[in-house]
Image (tube, coloured by chain):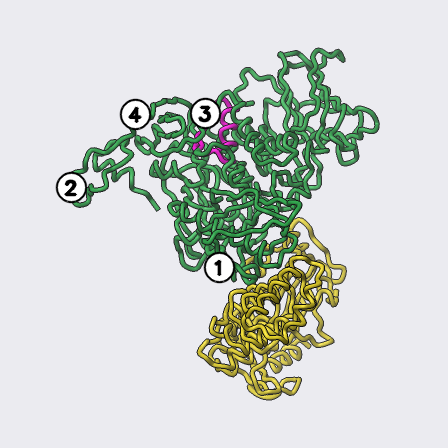
Amino acid sequence: MKTKRRAFIKTLGIGSGALFVSPGASALNGDTLEEPAVIDEKVFLKKEYNVDVLVAGGGMSGICAAIAAARNGSKVVLVQDRSRLGGNASSEIRMHISGATTLHQVWRETGVLEELFLTNSVENPQRSYELWDFILYNKVVSEPNITLLLDTVVFETEMDNHQITKVKALCSTTQELSEIRAKLYADCTGDGTLAACAGADYMLGREAKSKWGESLAVDVADNKSMGNSILFMSQEHKTKMPYTPPVWARKYTTKDFVHRKIISIEYGYWWLELGGMGDSVRDGQQNRHDLLSALFGVWDYIKNSGNHPEADNWALSWIGMIPGKRESRRIIGDYILKQDDIQKPKLFADRVSYGGWPIDDHPPEGMDGTAMEPTRAIYIKEPYSIPLRSLYSRNIKNLLMAGRNLSASHVALSSTRVMATCAAMGQAVGTAMSYCIHNNIAPATLGNNEDHLKDFQQILLRQDQSILGVKNTDANDFARNAKIRASSETKTGAALQVIDGVNRNIKDGSTHQWQAEMSAGEPWIELYWDKSLKINKIEMILDTGLNRFLRISGQDIVQADQILGPQPETISDYVIELRKKNKVLASKGSRNNYKRRVVHEFNPIDVDAVRITVNKTNGDALARIFEIRCYMEARTINK
Amino acid sequence: MKILVWTFILILMGQPFTGRSQTGSKQEQVIVAQVKGLGAVPVYLVYGADNMPETYHAYIRTPICEERLCYPVSIDLYWDLVGNFSKYELPADSPLTKFDHVPFTQADHKKMYKILADKASVLGVYKTEDLIDKNVQKVSSVVVDAVTGATNPSVKNVVVDGALYSAYTLWHLVNGCISTQILKHTESMFSDQLLISMLRSDNYNLQYYALNKAPLNHNKTYEDAIVDLIIRGATYIPYFAIEKLPLRLWNLSEYQERLLAAIPELKFELQNELLNKFKDLKLSKTALLALTNNLGGLKDSQILKALEIVLNNVTVLTSTAKPALTKLLTNKNEEISTKAAHILEQHKTN
């Protein structure tokens, strides 16, 4: 569906600075339009930004896009319309960050998202959602290249020849009108707001089976979508806690829970869902009220039906006020991801991230159709790749997107929409924007050029992006030419594996990591070369138990199979020594490490060996290292 | 030998139009389903002892190939009146087998029953090649060169391990076009008698289907059957029946009495549902007595609900009900004893 708004307004001759058009005017009748109203610039002070990258939307996609772009050298403005970052994952909505871990294999997402999860695990053992918000905030504001604009709403774009030249955003609390010029723009709003403003092609609703031969699509195309949900939390008290619902709460009886089991009461239910029958963009206010009505109806049932005596001493402690959205606009890219791409994974030449959630389509009726199952999850057998061509607009040349508003069919979206998958898309898009700016190419060029793609994928891999089927072939990585020796190694953990090009378990029978018993003393591994060389950077990928879940949750059973704090497999204390002729020329170490990817910079030194000694793990009996890389970098444009 | 086998197959497929099934009940051919790979399959409607339609039946003979390891399967399939899987029967000399001719165990059959009864199974969505893990191969110890892929881990729950194609083939036979045509045929036979027999059956699917179709046109037989379903319906049927019953019937003394008297034998959640439902209703004298006579065995929270109903209807409380309430005056739970006292107080003044 193409939106012609931009062209329409141009034809009328209204300047694109217009925000309001007087209600009485109608150009269709040939009336002359009155002078359009503008924002009072005496009250809303204009602030101008001229940067490399604008990321609109500070949910998980936007956060990862902004951080990735910033770390790759771009100057970034991140615009978020709330006071808190995180979107559906923030304390304001509290939906679970789900992704490929659900396969119960080895595919928990890595990169920036993993860094966020590990930090939260260590710094927020109290499982406070508000503290999680601040972990996200802290990560973003710690990047010197990011300017964060909270409470700031994107409302308009200026265009020139199918490119965005300026984005306007308003902050009512600071009364600023921000005008942001950037080279590239990323729509991580979820609703595709920036894209819609810019006139990007997008899709809405559900496509028919006949459109792309998707067996799980509906028979007849329609405007419905998956619905939105609101969550709650409750707490136990020492005495009975009575509950009276508001008069406008819905009334539920046991028949409404045939397919919706209430197995815990401290955290709400994803199936508390409404809004799919209407317009997921426009109907927001009514949808929120309907969801609250449903929520209080469900709680009333729990408290007063008599069927949940275990809830007698429990009372509501938090209620979401923002409906968590699953689906709205889907911006059209050069490639539309479809059902087949989810069920029969392809190694696209332009693959840049992956997903692993089931095809999880919800009937649009939600709580209006309690006789129906709230979802039909079709499990997939392995993760699937997402191509870059699904992450930039096909008609707006400098617009990219990440998150649930990617270029995908409704059926495919029902798998890609979950936040870990969105976060990985965000990192791909952020890195891509920096790459394009650095190489002075358009996103569409990158998406279709094999040479560029190969270089780009190497950058992604080096930065620990969640990506499938890419091995380290970085010619600048001296580790790849090194010989390896170690104090010891286990049968399945040969030291050589630290340079085998793979930085995680990929279920091919190999551990792809060096393993050594800690009990034998502090094990070490050494890379050495016959000829000495200059090195100024050592990078390592460590083990953080990617087979497990690791995410904040308000639900006890979700928390139960996670390990809080540093992951035991991760090396905690280590020392890196740069050596020449057996003499230690420089050394750097780390204590209380919990990160998966560690980077150490040195003054450039001529060395013939790099030795890493493991002093301590976070509990595991084995020292484990997936990958070691050695670089001599003239400039740190790609960290 | 092959010719003999195929002749035998052809003879078997040409069953008579009417006659007796193996159990001796009347059956008649009502559908000829065109099934992919099998051609025309006759489907019979089997009548019960009361001459009412009871089940649909088809005899199928089809090869099932677990990769290149094939074997012929003869199976009698049975569906309920709305096209759901009911059961299958296999000749003793022609069992279902898994890869490498390993016969099904009891547990395998149980699992297969569950698979075939699940209309929403992913077997309906995936193609067979999607269900195989090509990275793992099993080599037959029985047949030379026969190899099959292992069942993909993500679908292990929805198939019998080693009998992927059996599950797939049978699922499509059971839940494909034959099932659709069965429902269509039943709907063409609709009568009050048939619907009521479905309401009175023990089959959840039949009860649910008939409940949705039952007219509420002051037909006492329907109304009786629906009230009955509240008491004896399978799993969630009582709750749908409660929703179906119109308010005017909840106000009838006869039904109030029947439901309240049944409370002791009902499940906990259903007891609560009825107690919640009656909270705002005006009860008859006899209904209120049925309630007070059946407080034994109820949990405290439920007794309190019941007492609330009694209080709302204290004007029709008779002296016959007093002993049950007096007993509650000494109940350990103070809330209960206080409430009982209050009710008796109110009763005295009336």
Quick check: do tags 2 and 4 share a chain? Answer: yes
Dot 1 amino acid type: Gly
Which chain letter goes with mark 3?
A
What amino acid is at disc 4? Glu
The percent coordinates of residue A359 (x first, y second) are 54, 51
Q: Tell me the chain of label 4.
A: A
Q: Secondary structure at mark 4?
A: loop
Question: What residue is shown with label 4?
Answer: A41
Q: Which residues are magenta?
A: A56-80
For marks 1 and 2, give the one nearer the viewer: 1
Q: Which residue is mark 2?
A: A31
The numbered mark 2 sits on a residue in which chain?
A
Q: Quadrant of residue A477?
A: top right
Mark number displayed over residue A369: 1
Give the SS element for disc 2. loop
Residue A129 covered by magenta stretch: no
Please tell me if label 1 and label 2 are on a single chain: yes
Q: In whole angstroms, how far apart are the C-alphas of marks 1 and 2?
A: 47 Å
Looking at the rendered image, the disc whose residue lies closer to the viewer, 2 or 4, is 4
Q: Is residue A300 visible?
A: yes
Q: Considering only order in the chain, which callout, 1 or 3, is on the residue closer to the N terminus?
A: 3
Q: Nearer the viewer, mark 3 or mark 2?
A: 2
Neighbourhood count class around disc 3 (C-alpha, 10 Å): few under 14, some 14–19, many 20 upward: many
* Residue A277 image point, x, y percent: 42, 54
Q: Amino acid at mark 2?
A: Asp
Query: Badge 1 sits on which subunit?
Result: A
Q: Colour of chain B?
A: yellow
